[in-house]
Image: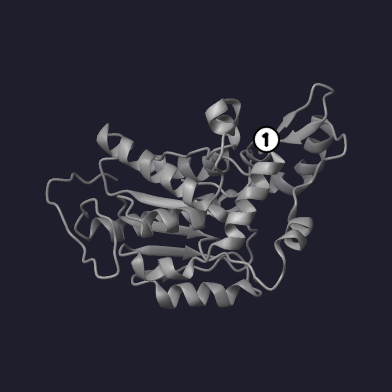
Amino acid sequence: MVHGLASNARMWDACAEALARAGVTCVAVDLRGHGRTAVSQAGRAGPHGTPTAAADVSALVDVLRADGTLPGPVVLAGQSWGGNVVLTAAASGARVDALALVDGGWLRFDRDEPFERLWARLAPPTWDGTTWDELTARLRPVLDGWGPHAVPAVLANLTTRPDGSVRNVLAPQAHEHILRSMYDDDPRPSYPRVRVPVLLAPAGGGPASALVDEAVAALPDAVLRRYDDAHHDLHLQHPARLAADLLDLLDRARARPVHAPQRHTDDTTDGTTDDESEDR
């Protein structure tokens, strides 16, 4: 389970709990510079961007397969920018058996807008001396209806300064580097290289609908489950519903042969092994 830009692993808590009750092993990751990873020098260190995050996730999958934590089949789920990360990982040969793109994976920017203007528009808030208690009071009326997991998950995106005011865990420079990576990268060439079942779970409609339809048409094995009235953080808002869709995706993965590790090229065909165990 991979979070989005300036987010953290705890956003997946409630969805992971629902899957765990169904007997599924779930691992949620804090990417470089995010969440608990940011407390270490390695977590703060660059580079930051989609290809680096995808390589990190792919390496983690290999480790968790090797130590038996994830015997397979393995579903890689990513939300928002995390969707672009897991798409890139799978297209680059990550050893996974299915993908879930949760309101992301198809994200790309209009290159007609200079990046500097984009950054000025999308730079993260500075919070202007807001305290932890003040921010909590702002969040509760909005998020309490989503369940007790929601406010703690969102607050895990933040920490405090010595004066008691809040700041973002992800450093502004790292945030800018990731956004620049999204600006420079185009997910469309990755679509035909993903040879595993894919779930697309977009929230709402609007201009992004065309990007979703484009991805569905280009991915070799895609199923679309729209969350028409959902927030962008639909994994936080509708964890039980998403967990059910992920279980369906896992069943699709279980129905297919488990794939051996490989690096995709334009003419690669899928290989299989029969010595992988299945886990649900």
Position of residue 219 measured from the top left corner of the image (x, y, whole percent): 39, 71
Determine the residue positioned at 63% across, 61% down.
230
Q: Residues within 10 Å of mark 1 (few under 14, many from 20)?
A: many
Query: On the image, numbered disc 1 is attached to which residue?
Result: 169
The furthest residue to the right: 129
Position of residue 209 measured from the top left corner of the image (x, y, whole percent): 58, 75
Query: Which residue is more in the foreground, 176 or 234?
Result: 176
* Residue 170 located left or right of residue 262: right
Residue 41, compared with residue 181, is above or below; it is: above
- The quarter of the image holding the C terminus is top left
Position of residue 41 measured from the top left corner of the image (x, y, whole percent): 57, 26
Determine the residue positioned at 55% across, 51% down.
235
Q: Amino acid at mark 1?
A: Val
Position of residue 122 measured from the top left corner of the image (x, y, whole percent): 74, 56
* Residue 96 located left or right of residue 208: left
Mark 1, secondary structure of its residue: loop
Determine the residue positioned at 63% across, 49% down.
177
Which of the 4 image quadrants contains residue 56? Answer: top left
Which of the 4 image quadrants contains residue 90? Answer: bottom left
